[in-house]
Amino acid sequence: MSGRAAGPLARARARAAWGLIAPMALVLLAVAAWPLGRTVWLGFTDASLAGGGDAAFVGWENYYAVFDGQAFGVLADPQWWRAVANTLVFTAASVSLETVLGVLVALVLHRRFPGRAWVRAAVLVPWAIPTVVSAKMWAWMLNDQVGVVNAALLGLGLIDAPLAWTADPLLSMIAVIGVDVWKTTPFMALLVLAALEMLPRDIYEAARVDGIHPVRVFFRVTLPLIAPALVVAVVFRTLDALRVFDLVYVLTANSPATMTMSVYARRELIDFQAAGTGSAAATLVVFIIALIAAMILTAARLRGREGAV
């Protein structure tokens, strides 16, 4: 096809795409614009849940301000920066483990074996359980007095005394990451499995005839072909992990060892009833998530261009 013919066709496809996207974009804008705008505005006021509806404009004081040589605001709070660090650690660890395990599970489910349909359905059960329900279930299982996890470890002789999984600073983060990996790995596996089902089988037949080792086939053929779907899955999970709230809050409440950015914003807004500070923290959460998402998508786009050269 010539360049002249491709130009109008590409523009027609772009217009059609925008026509299909526009209604949903308008609905999302109508639903999200007011709450987001209200949150951003409250972040510049001294609004308080205990102070009624009156709120005075205070500028950037909720974010950062210095009075009498002392810094105030979210950005001056060490607990905020610890929450940011906790969120990044949680996101990096959980998404990495879920990606690796999701690919392995998808490769197993992609093979033909008796009862495969039942196994596929069973694998999705953790993902189908509501997060609050699964978190509460695991909170009981990890209980240091009556939890089955400690009972199993004691029975196997792996520990000498019950472990406080949700109270110890290190173990609580491990527990939160472990529960999230248990729940969300099926989501990653589902997306990767969908990509595997779309791959042409003749490539693998040719590799088998040529005697290429399956591991080499995976890294040289399968992984590059499913990379676009894998990037989408990683982006979705990263954004979801960065805003995690319910899982962490149910398991460890406001513990500083596992407090995430969303839990911090909730504490400021509900526990301290500081709507201004809580809104400022929530705005920072949105900004950080948007920034990280843009970085991931930009890196994926640049990597895709390098691979196309």
Image (spheres, rainbow, N blue to C red):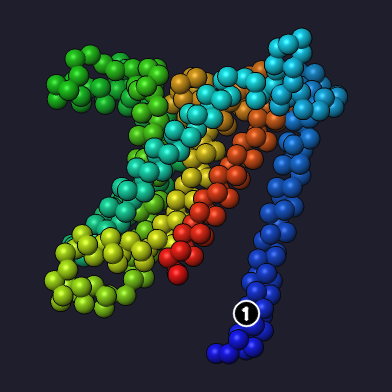
Q: Give the residue at x 81% y 28%.
A: 59
Q: Is residue 59 left or right of residue 28?
A: right
SS for dot 1: helix
Q: Position of residue 303 (x, y in %)?
A: 46, 59
Q: Give the residue at x 27% y 52%.
A: 104
The answer to which of 99 and 5 lies nearer the viewer is: 5
The answer to which of 201 and 76 lies nearer the viewer is: 76
Tell me if residue 132 comes above or below residue 61 in the rendering: below
Q: Is residue 295 left or right of residue 121?
A: right
Q: Give the residue at x 68% y 36%.
A: 283
Q: Position of residue 68 (x, y in %)?
A: 76, 9
Q: Position of residue 190 (x, y in %)?
A: 38, 56
Q: Give the residue at x 60% y 86%.
A: 3
Quick one: quadrant of the C terminus?
bottom left
Tell me if residue 197 comes above or below residue 43 in the rendering: below
Dot 1, how many residues are within 10 Å of its Cα: few (below 14), some (14-19), or many (20+)? few
Quick one: quadrant of the N terminus?
bottom right
Tell me if residue 44 comes above or below residue 195 in the rendering: above
- Outermost residue to the top: 68
Tally of numbered discs? 1
Tell me if residue 263 comes above or below residue 201 in the rendering: above
Q: Is residue 49 visible?
A: no
Amino acid type for the residue under numbered disc 1:
Ala
Residue beneath label 1, please? 10
The answer to which of 141 and 97 lies nearer the viewer is: 97
Dividing the picture into quadrants, the one containing residue 66 is: top right
Q: Position of residue 45 (x, y in %)?
A: 80, 27
